[in-house]
Image (cartoon, grey):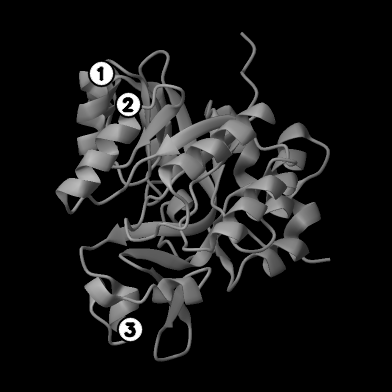
Amino acid sequence: MTQPRLKLALGSLLYFWTKQQIIDFYHQIAETPIDIIYLGETVCSKRRALSTQDWLELADFLRAKGKDVVLSTMTLIEANSELNQLKKLCKTDAYTVEANDFAAIDELALQGREFVTGLAINIYNSRTLAFLHQQGLKRWILSVELSKKQLTALQAERPEGVETEVFVWGRMPLAYSARCFTARAHNLPKDDCQYRCQDDPEGLLMQTREQQPFLCLNGIQTQSALTCNLLSEIDELKQLNVNVLRISPQPSYTAEIINAFHAVITGTATATDYQDKLKSWATVGTCDGYWHGDAGMVQQTKQVTA
Protein backbone atom coordinates (compact mmCIF):
# COMPACT_ATOMS: atom_id res chain seq x y z
CA MET A 1 0.00 0.00 0.00
CA THR A 2 1.42 3.39 -1.01
CA GLN A 3 1.94 5.87 1.82
CA PRO A 4 -0.01 9.13 1.17
CA ARG A 5 2.12 12.17 0.45
CA LEU A 6 3.29 13.99 3.57
CA LYS A 7 1.56 17.37 3.60
CA LEU A 8 2.67 20.72 5.01
CA ALA A 9 0.40 22.94 7.08
CA LEU A 10 0.79 26.52 8.30
CA GLY A 11 -0.72 26.94 11.75
CA SER A 12 -2.88 29.89 12.73
CA LEU A 13 -1.15 33.22 13.36
CA LEU A 14 -0.39 33.42 17.08
CA TYR A 15 0.74 37.06 17.23
CA PHE A 16 -1.01 40.42 16.89
CA TRP A 17 -0.11 42.07 13.59
CA THR A 18 -1.78 44.90 11.70
CA LYS A 19 -4.40 44.12 9.07
CA GLN A 20 -2.06 45.03 6.24
CA GLN A 21 0.75 42.89 7.67
CA ILE A 22 -1.61 39.92 7.86
CA ILE A 23 -2.95 40.38 4.32
CA ASP A 24 0.56 40.81 2.88
CA PHE A 25 1.79 37.77 4.80
CA TYR A 26 -0.87 35.42 3.46
CA HIS A 27 -0.52 36.73 -0.08
CA GLN A 28 3.16 35.73 0.17
CA ILE A 29 2.27 32.34 1.68
CA ALA A 30 -0.18 31.68 -1.15
CA GLU A 31 2.79 31.36 -3.52
CA THR A 32 4.56 28.70 -1.42
CA PRO A 33 4.08 24.91 -1.62
CA ILE A 34 2.07 24.84 1.62
CA ASP A 35 -0.91 22.45 1.45
CA ILE A 36 -3.06 23.45 4.43
CA ILE A 37 -3.50 26.88 6.04
CA TYR A 38 -5.18 27.48 9.41
CA LEU A 39 -6.83 30.89 9.70
CA GLY A 40 -8.30 32.85 12.59
CA GLU A 41 -7.58 34.34 15.99
CA THR A 42 -6.87 31.69 18.62
CA VAL A 43 -5.16 33.64 21.43
CA CYS A 44 -7.10 36.80 22.36
CA SER A 45 -10.58 37.98 21.39
CA LYS A 46 -9.46 41.62 21.71
CA ARG A 47 -7.25 41.21 18.65
CA ARG A 48 -9.60 42.34 15.91
CA ALA A 49 -7.27 43.47 13.13
CA LEU A 50 -9.41 41.31 10.84
CA SER A 51 -13.15 40.85 11.15
CA THR A 52 -14.82 37.48 10.64
CA GLN A 53 -15.73 38.58 7.11
CA ASP A 54 -12.10 39.57 6.45
CA TRP A 55 -10.93 36.09 7.50
CA LEU A 56 -13.53 34.45 5.26
CA GLU A 57 -12.51 36.57 2.29
CA LEU A 58 -8.89 35.62 2.94
CA ALA A 59 -9.95 31.96 3.15
CA ASP A 60 -11.70 32.25 -0.22
CA PHE A 61 -8.58 33.83 -1.74
CA LEU A 62 -6.31 31.06 -0.44
CA ARG A 63 -8.71 28.34 -1.57
CA ALA A 64 -8.67 29.84 -5.05
CA LYS A 65 -4.87 29.45 -4.89
CA GLY A 66 -5.30 25.74 -4.32
CA LYS A 67 -4.86 25.70 -0.53
CA ASP A 68 -6.91 23.63 1.90
CA VAL A 69 -8.16 26.19 4.44
CA VAL A 70 -9.17 25.39 8.03
CA LEU A 71 -10.85 27.94 10.33
CA SER A 72 -9.43 27.96 13.88
CA THR A 73 -11.44 28.68 17.03
CA MET A 74 -10.35 30.52 20.18
CA THR A 75 -8.39 28.57 22.76
CA LEU A 76 -9.75 30.08 25.97
CA ILE A 77 -13.43 31.09 26.08
CA GLU A 78 -14.05 33.67 28.82
CA ALA A 79 -17.30 35.45 27.91
CA ASN A 80 -20.70 34.76 26.38
CA SER A 81 -19.79 36.98 23.43
CA GLU A 82 -16.80 34.73 22.71
CA LEU A 83 -18.98 31.62 23.00
CA ASN A 84 -21.50 33.09 20.57
CA GLN A 85 -18.72 33.90 18.13
CA LEU A 86 -17.41 30.35 18.45
CA LYS A 87 -20.85 28.91 17.66
CA LYS A 88 -21.13 31.15 14.63
CA LEU A 89 -17.72 30.02 13.38
CA CYS A 90 -18.63 26.36 13.87
CA LYS A 91 -21.66 26.86 11.62
CA THR A 92 -19.49 28.09 8.73
CA ASP A 93 -19.85 24.87 6.79
CA ALA A 94 -17.78 26.02 3.80
CA TYR A 95 -14.58 25.15 5.68
CA THR A 96 -13.30 22.55 8.12
CA VAL A 97 -12.95 23.89 11.68
CA GLU A 98 -10.00 23.42 14.03
CA ALA A 99 -11.34 23.05 17.59
CA ASN A 100 -9.05 24.56 20.22
CA ASP A 101 -11.53 24.21 23.08
CA PHE A 102 -14.00 21.49 24.07
CA ALA A 103 -16.85 23.94 23.66
CA ALA A 104 -16.04 23.91 19.95
CA ILE A 105 -15.88 20.11 19.91
CA ASP A 106 -19.32 19.90 21.57
CA GLU A 107 -20.80 22.37 19.10
CA LEU A 108 -19.32 20.61 16.07
CA ALA A 109 -20.39 17.18 17.36
CA LEU A 110 -23.96 18.45 17.82
CA GLN A 111 -23.95 19.52 14.18
CA GLY A 112 -22.53 16.19 13.05
CA ARG A 113 -19.51 17.89 11.48
CA GLU A 114 -16.00 16.53 11.12
CA PHE A 115 -13.28 18.62 12.75
CA VAL A 116 -9.58 18.96 13.45
CA THR A 117 -8.12 19.40 16.94
CA GLY A 118 -5.51 22.04 17.73
CA LEU A 119 -2.56 22.04 20.11
CA ALA A 120 -4.70 23.15 23.08
CA ILE A 121 -6.62 19.85 22.99
CA ASN A 122 -4.51 17.36 24.92
CA ILE A 123 -4.62 13.85 23.48
CA TYR A 124 -2.41 11.55 25.51
CA ASN A 125 -3.88 8.08 24.90
CA SER A 126 -5.79 5.96 22.41
CA ARG A 127 -9.01 6.12 24.45
CA THR A 128 -9.16 9.88 23.95
CA LEU A 129 -8.49 9.46 20.24
CA ALA A 130 -11.27 6.89 19.96
CA PHE A 131 -13.72 9.09 21.88
CA LEU A 132 -13.00 12.15 19.76
CA HIS A 133 -13.25 10.06 16.59
CA GLN A 134 -16.78 9.18 17.65
CA GLN A 135 -17.49 12.91 17.99
CA GLY A 136 -16.25 13.61 14.45
CA LEU A 137 -12.46 13.92 14.68
CA LYS A 138 -10.76 13.63 11.30
CA ARG A 139 -7.27 14.92 12.21
CA TRP A 140 -5.45 15.43 15.48
CA ILE A 141 -2.14 17.06 16.34
CA LEU A 142 0.42 15.63 18.74
CA SER A 143 0.86 17.73 21.89
CA VAL A 144 4.25 19.45 21.72
CA GLU A 145 5.45 17.87 24.99
CA LEU A 146 4.96 14.30 23.77
CA SER A 147 7.80 12.25 22.32
CA LYS A 148 8.45 10.05 19.31
CA LYS A 149 7.98 7.02 21.58
CA GLN A 150 4.55 8.21 22.69
CA LEU A 151 3.54 9.02 19.12
CA THR A 152 4.54 5.50 18.05
CA ALA A 153 2.19 4.01 20.64
CA LEU A 154 -0.67 6.32 19.64
CA GLN A 155 -0.20 5.61 15.95
CA ALA A 156 -0.46 1.87 16.59
CA GLU A 157 -4.01 2.34 17.92
CA ARG A 158 -5.12 5.30 15.82
CA PRO A 159 -8.71 4.88 14.58
CA GLU A 160 -9.04 4.16 10.88
CA GLY A 161 -9.63 7.30 8.86
CA VAL A 162 -8.07 9.69 11.40
CA GLU A 163 -5.03 11.67 10.25
CA THR A 164 -2.08 12.67 12.42
CA GLU A 165 -0.36 16.05 12.41
CA VAL A 166 2.90 17.00 14.15
CA PHE A 167 4.20 20.46 15.09
CA VAL A 168 7.65 20.65 13.46
CA TRP A 169 8.67 24.31 13.48
CA GLY A 170 8.00 27.32 15.68
CA ARG A 171 7.85 28.56 19.23
CA MET A 172 5.81 25.97 21.08
CA PRO A 173 2.54 27.02 22.75
CA LEU A 174 2.93 25.79 26.34
CA ALA A 175 0.16 27.32 28.46
CA TYR A 176 -2.76 29.76 28.55
CA SER A 177 -4.09 31.93 31.34
CA ALA A 178 -7.04 34.26 31.92
CA ARG A 179 -4.41 36.85 32.86
CA CYS A 180 -2.60 38.79 30.12
CA PHE A 181 1.11 38.56 30.82
CA THR A 182 2.03 41.13 28.20
CA ALA A 183 -0.24 43.74 29.80
CA ARG A 184 1.17 42.91 33.22
CA ALA A 185 4.73 43.31 31.92
CA HIS A 186 3.78 46.91 31.00
CA ASN A 187 1.96 47.50 34.33
CA LEU A 188 -1.38 47.67 32.55
CA PRO A 189 -4.67 45.96 33.46
CA LYS A 190 -5.95 43.39 30.99
CA ASP A 191 -9.08 45.45 30.24
CA ASP A 192 -6.90 48.43 29.30
CA CYS A 193 -3.96 46.62 27.71
CA GLN A 194 -3.60 49.27 24.96
CA TYR A 195 -2.85 46.36 22.62
CA ARG A 196 0.78 46.38 23.70
CA CYS A 197 1.31 42.88 22.26
CA GLN A 198 1.31 44.56 18.84
CA ASP A 199 4.69 46.02 19.83
CA ASP A 200 6.12 42.50 19.91
CA PRO A 201 5.38 40.80 16.55
CA GLU A 202 7.01 37.60 17.80
CA GLY A 203 6.18 37.81 21.49
CA LEU A 204 8.03 39.21 24.50
CA LEU A 205 11.19 37.23 25.28
CA MET A 206 11.94 36.24 28.89
CA GLN A 207 15.42 35.30 30.05
CA THR A 208 16.89 33.62 33.11
CA ARG A 209 19.19 35.47 35.52
CA GLU A 210 22.03 34.00 33.49
CA GLN A 211 20.62 35.79 30.41
CA GLN A 212 19.57 32.55 28.76
CA PRO A 213 16.34 32.52 26.69
CA PHE A 214 13.62 30.82 28.71
CA LEU A 215 10.03 31.62 27.70
CA CYS A 216 8.13 33.96 25.41
CA LEU A 217 5.05 35.92 26.52
CA ASN A 218 2.32 36.40 23.93
CA GLY A 219 -0.67 37.97 25.66
CA ILE A 220 -2.43 35.19 27.61
CA GLN A 221 -0.25 32.57 25.93
CA THR A 222 3.14 31.34 27.15
CA GLN A 223 5.46 29.94 24.49
CA SER A 224 8.91 28.42 24.42
CA ALA A 225 11.69 30.93 23.74
CA LEU A 226 13.49 28.42 21.55
CA THR A 227 12.07 27.29 18.22
CA CYS A 228 11.05 23.66 17.86
CA ASN A 229 12.82 22.23 14.81
CA LEU A 230 12.13 18.70 13.54
CA LEU A 231 13.46 19.13 10.01
CA SER A 232 15.98 16.35 10.64
CA GLU A 233 13.22 13.96 11.71
CA ILE A 234 11.21 13.91 8.48
CA ASP A 235 12.23 10.37 7.53
CA GLU A 236 11.12 9.10 10.94
CA LEU A 237 7.87 11.04 10.70
CA LYS A 238 7.20 9.36 7.36
CA GLN A 239 7.94 5.95 8.84
CA LEU A 240 5.46 6.68 11.64
CA ASN A 241 2.74 7.32 9.03
CA VAL A 242 2.30 10.96 10.01
CA ASN A 243 0.08 12.77 7.49
CA VAL A 244 0.72 16.48 8.12
CA LEU A 245 3.61 18.59 9.42
CA ARG A 246 2.73 21.96 10.98
CA ILE A 247 4.86 25.09 10.74
CA SER A 248 4.00 28.07 12.94
CA PRO A 249 3.98 31.56 11.34
CA GLN A 250 6.70 34.05 12.32
CA PRO A 251 7.39 37.62 11.15
CA SER A 252 10.36 36.68 8.98
CA TYR A 253 11.46 33.71 6.86
CA THR A 254 8.19 31.77 7.02
CA ALA A 255 8.16 31.26 3.24
CA GLU A 256 11.80 30.14 3.30
CA ILE A 257 11.06 27.68 6.11
CA ILE A 258 8.13 26.23 4.16
CA ASN A 259 10.33 25.82 1.10
CA ALA A 260 13.03 24.09 3.16
CA PHE A 261 10.60 21.54 4.63
CA HIS A 262 9.08 20.96 1.20
CA ALA A 263 12.52 20.35 -0.30
CA VAL A 264 13.41 17.77 2.37
CA ILE A 265 10.02 16.06 2.11
CA THR A 266 10.32 15.74 -1.66
CA GLY A 267 13.95 14.64 -1.49
CA THR A 268 15.42 17.55 -3.44
CA ALA A 269 17.52 18.52 -0.41
CA THR A 270 18.56 17.17 2.97
CA ALA A 271 18.19 18.68 6.42
CA THR A 272 21.94 19.26 6.62
CA ASP A 273 21.71 21.56 3.58
CA TYR A 274 19.76 24.01 5.75
CA GLN A 275 21.64 23.85 9.06
CA ASP A 276 23.32 27.24 8.79
CA LYS A 277 20.17 28.94 7.49
CA LEU A 278 18.05 27.45 10.27
CA LYS A 279 20.21 29.20 12.83
CA SER A 280 19.32 32.58 11.36
CA TRP A 281 15.65 31.68 10.81
CA ALA A 282 15.14 30.81 14.49
CA THR A 283 15.12 33.95 16.64
CA VAL A 284 17.17 32.69 19.59
CA GLY A 285 17.96 29.06 18.75
CA THR A 286 16.29 25.70 18.18
CA CYS A 287 15.29 22.71 20.29
CA ASP A 288 13.95 19.18 19.83
CA GLY A 289 14.13 17.76 23.36
CA TYR A 290 10.49 16.81 23.75
CA TRP A 291 10.58 14.73 20.57
CA HIS A 292 13.42 12.67 22.03
CA GLY A 293 11.80 12.32 25.46
CA ASP A 294 14.12 14.88 27.03
CA ALA A 295 13.69 18.36 28.48
CA GLY A 296 12.01 20.56 25.90
CA MET A 297 14.84 23.12 25.78
CA VAL A 298 17.41 20.51 24.77
CA GLN A 299 18.77 20.30 21.22
CA GLN A 300 19.55 16.60 20.80
CA THR A 301 19.97 16.32 17.05
CA LYS A 302 23.53 17.18 16.19
CA GLN A 303 23.79 20.52 14.43
CA VAL A 304 25.98 20.08 11.36
CA THR A 305 28.12 23.04 10.35
CA ALA A 306 29.88 23.68 7.08
- Circle 2/circle 1 CB separation < 8 Å: yes
First-in-chain label (3 vs 1): 1
Q: Nearer the viewer, residue 263 or 301?
A: 263
Residue under pointer 1: 111
Whether residue 70 sits left or right of residue 89 in the image: it is: right
Q: Which of the two marks, 2 or 1, is nearer to us in this view? A: 2
* Residue 197 can be seen, yes or no: yes
Spatial distance from mark 3 to mark 2, Cα to Cα?
A: 37 Å
Q: Classify mark 1: residues with Cα within 10 Å, few (<14), some (14-19) or many (20+).
A: few
The disc label shown at residue 88, or none: none
Quarter of the rendering occupied by the C terminus: bottom right
Q: Which residue appears at 63% of the width and 40% of the height?
A: 234
Residue 52 image offset from top left, x and y in percent: 42, 43
Q: Residue 185 carries which label?
A: 3
Could you give the CA–CA distance between mark 2 and mark 1, rounded to whole angstroms? 8 Å
| Residue 101 x %, y % | 26, 41
Looking at the image, which residue sits at the far bottom?
A: 209
Secondary element at tag 3: helix
Specify the quadrant that holds the N terminus.
top right
SS class, disc 1 = loop
- Which residue lies at the image location 37% right of the left edge and 50% below the top edge? 42
Q: Who's the residue at 59% across and 70% down the image?
A: 285
Rendered view: 275 above or below 54: below
Can you tell which mark lies on residue 91?
Answer: 2
Distance Cα–Cα, label 3 vs label 1 = 41 Å
Specify the amino acid type for callout 3.
Ala
What's the residue type where badge 2 is placed? Lys
At x 61% / y 60%, what residue is drawn? Answer: 21
